[in-house]
Image (cartoon, rainbow, N blue to C red):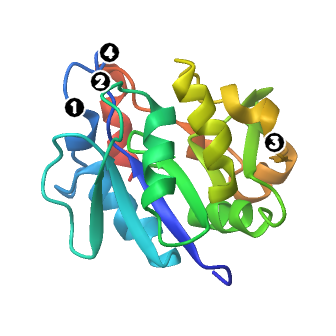
Amino acid sequence: MSAAATLIILAGGESKRMGQPKHLLTTPRGETIIEHLVTELGRLFDETLIVGRNLPIPPANVRMVEDTQLVRSPLVGIYSGLLAAKTVLSFVVACDMPFVRGELVEYIVSRSCNVDVCVPIVRGYYEPLCAAYRQSAIPAIARAIERGVFKVTAPYSALNLRLISEEEIRLFDPGLASFTNLNVPRQLPLLTQI
């Protein structure tokens, strides 16, 4: 990738619907989803961060970052990761999204010039946990957190966004597999597709 950028993997969720910590789910090869994401996407970035609380020892060449707040929220994870990143630009992905395509990630990052956030739109909705963020977004995110507003897209109204259309996404991921979240146990057989 031509631009210096950080990969931020969010691993701080409560996993209530899954019934077990999602960051510990394993693929048929015996690696956790986080290890899979580090292998598949980490090579594209200058550094890789895993953000959360009480996490296991990270894979080699990966830095752990604790959430800055006790509130478990992806927005807090994004904020914590952006503060810790050594680069101005970061790509954020949730640890329960094992099918994110590297080509799509590279495209999103390439389209993130001169904006605070470059975010895909899938089926009419933002996909903020598979998006590129600049550190210029930190003040707006901090204001939302200070107000107790933890919806990930809450700061978007105060930020300069670039939207990646579903048509653009399908050039790299025709079936939109990148946006599959593993939320409930019945989805675990999907891991055999890795």
* Residue corresponding to mark 4: 17
How far apart are labels 4 and 1 at the CA level?
10 Å
The amino acid marked with disc number 1 is Pro
Q: Which quadrant of the view contains residue 122?
A: top right
Query: What amino acid type should be assigned to the residue bearing mark 2?
Result: Ser
Residue that mark 1 sits on: 21
Specify which label sits upstream in the sequence, 4 or 3: 4
For label 3, the crowd category at 10 Å Cα-Cα, with few meaning under 14, some 14 to 19 and many 20 or more, is some
Mark before the other along the chain sequence, 1 or 3: 1
What is the crowding at mark 1: few (fewer than 14 residues within 10 Å), some, or many (at least 20)? some
Disc number for residue 113 = none
Nearer the observer, disc 1 or disc 3?
Answer: 1
Determine whether the residue tagged by mark 3 lies in a helix, strand or loop: helix
> Which residue occupies the extreme bottom position in the image?
2
Quadrant of the rendered image containing residue 61: bottom left
Kind of residue at disc 4: Arg
1 and 3 marks in contact (CB < 8 Å)? no
Residue 189 horizontal side relative to residue 170, left or right: left
Circles 1 and 2 in contact, beta carbons < 8 Å: yes
Mark 2 surroundings: few (<14), some (14-19) or many (≥20) residues within 10 A: some
- Judging depth in this view, the residue of 93 and 63 nearest the camera is 63
Mark 2 highlights which residue?
Answer: 15
Q: Which residue is mark 3?
A: 166
User: Is any atom of residue 119 visible in this view?
Assistant: yes
Position of the N terminus, as image quadrant, is bottom right
Q: Contact (CB < 8 A) between labels 2 and 4? A: yes
What residue is drawn where x is 19% and y is 26%? 20
Q: Residue at x 48, y 63 (%)?
A: 7
Q: CA distance from mark 4 to mark 3?
A: 28 Å
Residue 164: give x, y in percent of width and height: 81, 48
Tell me: residue 147, above or below residue 159.
above
